[in-house]
Image (tube, rainbow, N blue to C red):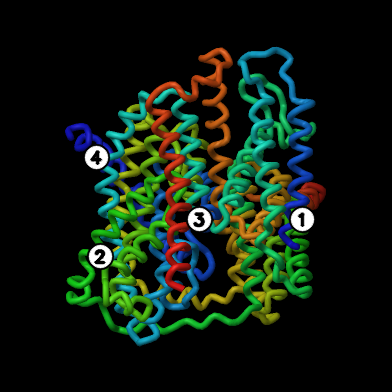
Amino acid sequence: MADRIFSGVLFLVTLAYAVIAFTSIKAPFQYDPLGPETWPQLLSVVALLCIAHVFWRPDVHDAGVPRMMWVRLGYMVLLMLAYAELYERLGFVVSTMLYAGTASRMLGAKLVNAAIFAGVAGIGGYLLCSVILDMNLPFGEWFEVLLSSGE
Amino acid sequence: MDTIFSGLATGFMVALTPFNLMLVMGGCFFGTLIGALPGIGPINGVAILLPIAYSLGFPPESALILLAGIYYGAEYGGRISSILLNVPGDAGAVMTTLDGNPMARKGEAGRALSLSAVASFIGGTVSIVLMTLFAPVLSKFAVTFSPADYVALMVFAFASLASLVGKNPTKTLLGALIGLMLATIGIDANTGVARYAFGIPDLLAGIDFLIVVVGLFGMAELLSLVEEQLSGRLKTLPVDKSFVRWADMAKAKWTILRCSIIGFIIGVLPGTGASVASAVAYGTEKRLAGEDGKLFGTGDVRGLAAPESANNAAAGGAMVPMLTLGIPGSGTTAILLGALLMFNIQPGPLLFTQHPEIAWGLIASMYVGNVALLLINLPLVGLFARLLLIPQHYLTPLIAILSFVGIYSIVGNPFDLFLIVGLGVFGWFLKKMQFSLAPIILGFVLGGLFEGNLRRALSISGGDWGILFEDYQSLLLYGLAILVVVGPAYVSYRNRKAAKLNA
């Protein structure tokens, strides 16, 4: 069942891919015999055949993920999206501390340990990557605004 | 022969500069560290550290030496969690658990670890020597390849991928197709037409290779770790003082040599890497051992030495087609190939003449790395074993933090961070549906090359598809492709028939 749902979704996406390949991709001027559209057309046809085969003879019937696990995984994905959203705004140090703390806490670390881990990851990570290795990490837009308005 | 020696001399001049020497050592150390962590294999380690290595701003040969060190080290470190935890870091280490873990349970963890380190070292060294001998020859031959031959080569690569990797060939092929389709996103280089960009400026240049790699092998792995975490605590066995004995080596020496060669050959086959090599090596040795074969799986030294020498030999073997043909031999080398492309270096037959310092520097650094790994691994194995005790609840967020640092520091675009999370979710679903992810990255890396050569071939012939089947080289490759698909299918058919007769 799980296989069928997944291959069904994959089928629709690939179908959309195929439709675009067959209808809308066109070069205004043909440089080579194949043009930009032939390759995606070929790929989509073979892919659709493969998906049809998976749909016909599925071999995964149950994803084996209990409901609680979906919740946890969803929560983890949300945390990562929030981390991505806040990355530039709050800067590396604060957003990493927030993410590391909440994520490790969710995965079962004790409160104190999670806090220590968050501190080490945020501050230590910034010192190591940005100060020592000279990599490009966000300092935080909001702090920059604060600092510049203070002057 | 002369070219090989002068090439090696150039290579060692590059690899033995203090800075590059430090990078080899550092790469090997961090690679072993990452490989030793339970559940994280070489491919994940290289994927997570690749963007960081890229944005450090090293010259290409140094960055590549660092990455190869990480790759090699991770391949080495994988055995530690296999032996002590019975948890393989990746598919290539599964066979190591079969005899390695029983040895550790018998209280011989130290012996198992040191024996496997020596077996890995020999496997690795044999494969580098073979690579030094064969790579230049192969690259000289490959210079004569026409675009049509390249198309045939790709067909062969994907055929051997589909038939030898994963349980379900259709899913493996579909994975490769997904990778190829992802590679078509962005502006077509020949005509300037945008494909599948939907007007989103971030997609016009195509999805960055690093994002696909980190998404599929970093973030998807993270979600799998979250999922596995609840299903039982891991228990590690202690490392004791026992050490590999001469008697073990004497017993296993032919096994190690045979398996090194098996591993190298399988590694060279495009698409198939350490996992297939170790499985084939283990099966062969078990059959050759005859009556003793029954001892395999209970802690036999040969059963441990076979997969370990084979998977390290395959790691080296997989570099051969990557360096000489531009076609990676495994998922991890596909990532290394992508890394080369990011530095604007096109691997392939001309690499040895155009960038000898990179090709030979890399090979020389592998000699150095192999020795370094043996020296690091024998005394420090206790330290790496202690890493297995790092709780998963710190390790898992750490993967996300490292991935974010690496991806953000490339161009500083927050859109990329969302993309890796999205690809991670997609990759996790694929894994749940028993797709293997390596074919996707192979497809993604080879997409441009495959399409480019096909179009070039048809431009030469003026649109006549017959050009694809014209010369003997391409016909030979199509023949091999058919062989590699039909061969294993025939063997399993015969086995099933034999099993039915016996039953």
Please tell me whether residue A124 is drawn above or below residue B407 in the rendered image: below
Where does label 4 land, which residue? Answer: B8
Where does label 2 land, which residue? Answer: B255
Q: Chain of mark 4?
A: B
Residue A75 in the image: state x and y as whole percent: 77, 67
Tags 2 and 4 on a common chain: yes
Where does label 3 land, which residue? Answer: B43
Left/right placement of residue B471 relative to residue B121 reads right
Query: What amino acid is at disc 2?
Result: Thr
Displayed quadrant of residue B6: top left
Q: Earlier in the sequence, mark 2 or mark 3?
A: 3
Q: What SS does tag 3 mark? A: helix
Q: Chain of mark 3?
A: B
Query: What amino acid is at disc 4?
Result: Leu
Residue B102 in the image: state x and y as whole percent: 39, 81
Left/right placement of residue A19 relative to residue B101 reads right
State the CA–CA distance, disc 2 to disc 3: 27 Å
Q: Which residue is rendered at x = 73% and y = 50% of the image?
A: B418
Please tell me whether residue B163 is drawn above or below residue A127 in the rendered image: above
State the CA–CA distance, disc 2 to disc 1: 55 Å
Residue B445 in the image: state x and y as whole percent: 54, 40
State the CA–CA distance, disc 3 to disc 1: 29 Å
Please tell me whether residue B450 is drawn above or below residue B368 in the rendered image: above
Q: Chain of mark 1?
A: A
State the CA–CA distance, disc 4 to disc 1: 49 Å
Instruction: Give the camera-side residue of A68 and B174.
Output: B174
Q: Which residue is rendered at x = 25% and y = 53% of the image?
A: B126
Q: What SS does tag 2 mark? A: helix
Q: Residues within 10 Å of mark 2 (few under 14, many from 20)?
A: many
Tags 3 and 1 on a common chain: no
Q: Which residue is rendered at x = 38% and y = 26% of the image?
A: B472
Q: Earlier in the sequence, mark 4 or mark 3?
A: 4
